[in-house]
Image (spheres, rainbow, N blue to C red):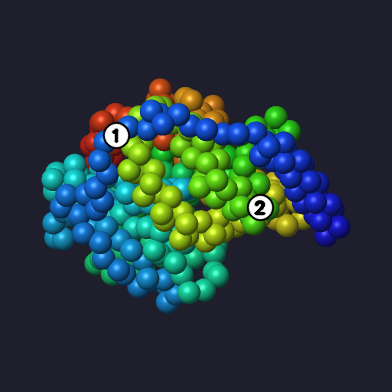
Amino acid sequence: MWVSSVLSAGVVAYIAYFVAIRMNETYDVPDDFFSNESFVWPCEGANYEVVTVNHDLEMRVVVSGPSNASNAILFLHGFPSSSSMWKEYIPYFANKGYRVIAPDLRGFNDSIPTSPRMSFEVLVEDMVGLLKKENRQEVIVVGHDWGTVVGLGLSILQPEMTKGFVSINVPHLELYRRHNLLGLPFTLRKTWYFLFFGLLTSVAHEALSARQWQWATWFLFGSANPKTFSKQELQAHKVFWSKSMGSMLRWYQMGAMWFLRGILPWQSNGFLASFWNDGVSPVVVPTLLLLGSHDIYVDPKMAGLSISREYTAHPVSRGVVMDATHWLPQEVPHLCIREMERFFEDAGIV
């Protein structure tokens, strides 16, 4: 145990030093970086519902499309977004005849749980409960960022409910941990914020919210291509960040502990222990991985390995690296939709 404590303390000290230096700088995003487009949410044809799941969460869910559609798509957002990130996708696929389901995930926006429970399994249980309330036995799962983590869990733990899995900007979690642990300390340039948010959560919350979310705006959205987000969209984000950033950061507390456990061999029977059992847990459903070549948070070099048989066991699986950043779904929605429809056809899930 003492090794674990020393290791954690060393990581925290390093991050604290690094962040203290960075926080003394001024981070301004030029006003013309954001577009003047209007932001209307929910989008046309979509409605918000409140669904009680897992006994402790009244989940806000956007639904659209025919309720009796033969195929449904579950869109799962990431950090620091909400279901609104799918505003280009929801009307498109609803008009194509799909039932579209896009929740605000546990701890985001108004989906605030009444208990502090947080684990990969709990997040999967949330989705199982939601799909049961929607009378869906199986869905196509599309996830971005942390939403990909939930989609990965659903695909592994509930493959019978997952017709196909589209993972955007995040590879298989075990590969993510392996790549970044074996690459230390060099990989800290892409993972320092992950540990900072998870291990120094109160400090991170203070840093993110300071000066009317100035650093959050720069670090989170400033890495996108110009005009990806609008001024109205940014303001909408700041409103729900003010309500729920504390609970949103709990995802990183969970993730940081899981990430660091990979260094402690006695906690599992193998260095690459998955988060549910020993050894790697491959995805066994058709899988499409989309990564951005200019992602400052996730190394696109993981694309090829992530769809290898070690991590993705289904024969209909492929990876695509696009000329985009971590905000790939918002930057090139037309390309994402094209790849998704091609994937649905190849996998025979339409």
Residue 10 x %, y %: 81, 46
- Which of pointers 1 and 2 lies earlier in the amino acid sequence? 1
Amino acid residing under circle 2: Val
Q: Residue at x 27, y 44 (%)?
A: 39
Q: Quadrant of the C terminus?
A: top left
Q: Quadrant of the N terminus?
A: bottom right
Q: Which residue is mark 2?
A: 203
Q: Nearer the viewer, residue 162 or 192?
A: 192
Q: Residue at x 62, y 39 (%)?
A: 191
- Residue 37 appears in which quarter of the rendering? top left
State whether residue 319 is above or below residue 193.
above
State whether residue 4 is above or below residue 57.
above
Q: Residue at x 41, y 59 (%)?
A: 109
Q: Residue at x 68, y 37 (%)?
A: 24
Q: Nearer the viewer, residue 199 or 279?
A: 199
Q: Which mark is residue 334?
A: none
Amino acid residing under circle 1: Asn
Q: Which residue is mark 1?
A: 36
